[in-house]
Image (spheres, coloured by chain):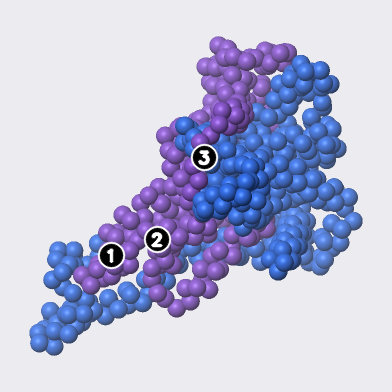
Amino acid sequence: MRSLRAGRLTYVVLALFTAGSLFPLLWTAIAASRTSTRLAQTPPPFWFGGNLGHNLQVAWTDANMGTALLNTVIVAGTVAAGTVFFSTLAGFAFAKLRFRGSRPLLALVIGTMLIPPQLSVVPLYMLIAKLSWTDRLQAVILPTLVGAFGVFFMRQYLAHALPMELVEAARTDGASSLRVLWHVVFPAARPAMAVLGMLTFVMAWNDFFWPIVALTQNGSPTVQVALTGLGRGYIPDQSVIMAGALLGTLPLLLVFLVFGRQIVGGIMQGAVKG
Amino acid sequence: MTDETVVLSPSAVGPERPAAEGGGRSGRGGRAQVWRSRRYRWDLRFSPYAFVAPFFLFFAAFGLFPLLYTGWAALHQVELTDPDSMTWVGLRNFTRLWDDEFFWNALRNTVTIGLLSTVPQLAIALGLAHLLNYRLRGSAFFRVAVLTPYATSVAAATLVFVLLFGRDYGMVNWALSAVGFEAVDWQNGTFASQFAVSTIVIWRWTGYNALIYLAAMQAVPGELYESAALDGASRFQQFLHVTVPSLRPTIFFTCVVSTIGATQLFGEPLLFNGGAAATGGSDHQFQTLGLYLYEQGWVNLHLGRASAIAWAMFLILLLIAGAARLLRGRKDSR
């Protein structure tokens, strides 16, 4: 591994990148704290105003942001928990258990990653319409509850992180598969489960295409769908729209503030092993 | 847990031993042990399938079935208002697409926006990863900071950029005029709007790709750099002749992923329109295939035609994949 010390120029350029990455978010907050009349003036505001509370309140009530946030927490939480659980089961089986057909089955799992989501959106819609699930949260939860990426991620991790001797020792002690899973696999997989959970949570929170097809704004939308309603001009107030965008982004920013390093590590780990 | 004896004293009740000693004992205890060992063998044989089953069950229901059914629906006239009644029309949905100027327009836009967003994004990510690979003070901070846009949703990001790219009061035009350029109509110009939409994609995904490159860079053996330095290669030459070739598989991987992402572009062009309609601008100037599919299916209510667009998108992806494979095969054989 190379460890050249960074020059001053490197810091300058990186600082510019950081500014570019963070500025739109900062400006969302600035715009959300102003009035729409102030936003329709030049030069644009560069610092916070005093209207944040009012804008947040309008966005909260008019776009039903409270319900939308709650729905999104339910959706993203369930999807993350389900993905982590099912992926750990399948990842363990593919990494450590010998069974007939495991290789072609794993190839099939990876192959499913190549299928674009658009290809199934029409029948999926017809399916949930038939089940009368339109506007219901299970319409967005169930189709995304498992994913090939998660299975592959857990398989790669467990192949390295779980010593076969541990599994075999538990076996000779007479442990059933469920017991092995509970007392050996889950503890060994915990770091990867946490990372996969966060990555999945972020993805499910930000998912857009399927939720906007399956959930209308009047039913029980997720934050992303509710935001679209704001953007469509039901409330043509730019500062309120920005307040809504802030509400939809803030929870994930907090997650990033706390777990940012782990998420970075997880993405880099997935990249090397994948 | 299910087996209480095992929970109480796991080592005392071995899996094979009870079966072997079972003959010496009599009555219910023996039978229970035979039963236990049989259950143990079943457990060994079938639990792997039980563990992978959820994935395949969900995939069959929400992945495979819809995938095949889309092909079937594409051969029918189906309206969103009554999805149950399907009229067979053969290939008409496809022939109509062929003569549909909006389809070709959307395809063209998808390609240009895809190039405008993917090429700069990956190039910037590569340079950024190179900088992050130096020994840095506060490297964790920089890594998290450049990844932060990844945490922002398409909806939130696009709404901010709509304001930043506003024609009259947007910050981009304000900055342009401050340094003496003319204001640009980012909504209505064809190239300008496609550039603006691409900016959103670049902003959200550059940091993510940079981290993937960084991970690959850290796996490059240090000796390669040392010998290059001995040969008198400058840092930039090292980057060009050591880093980039070592990263070729990773670069290929990110190109594939970004291309797939670009063909599916949907949220950015939908919301960049001020969300008024799914037309991708007053003149369809930034309508992508994904957006056109949505317009046909959920605005014009023609689900059959939407399915045909989905299959067309899939075929285009296959063509790209085939071309990439050919390209790669030629490079490897050289």
Whether callout 1 and callout 2 share a subunit is answered yes
Q: Disc 1, disc 2: CB below 8 Å?
A: no
Residue B109, percent from left and from top: 80, 45
Q: Residues within 10 Å of mark 3 (few under 14, many from 20)?
A: few
From this viewpoint, is residue A42 visible?
yes
Q: Name the secondary structure under disc 2.
A: helix
Q: Amino acid at mark 3?
A: Leu
Which of the 4 image quadrants contains residue B66?
bottom right
Task: Name the residue located 54 percent from the left edge and 25 percent from the top edge.
Answer: A60
Per the model, the C-alpha gap separating discs 2 and 3 is 30 Å
User: Which residue is under mark 1?
Assistant: A166
**Type of the residue with mark 1:** Leu
Secondary structure category for the residue under label 3: loop
Mark 2 and mark 3 on one chain: yes
Of residues A256 and A125, the one drawn nearer to the viewer in this rendering = A256
Q: Is residue B233 above or below residue A13?
A: below
Residue position marked by numbered label 2 in the rendering: A160
In the displayed structure image, the side of residue B62 where residue A74 appears, left or right: left
Q: Which residue is mark 3?
A: A4
Residue A121 in view: no
Q: Chain of mark 1?
A: A
Question: Which callout, 2 or 3, points at the residue further toward the start of the chain?
Answer: 3
Residue for point 82% across, 61% down: B94
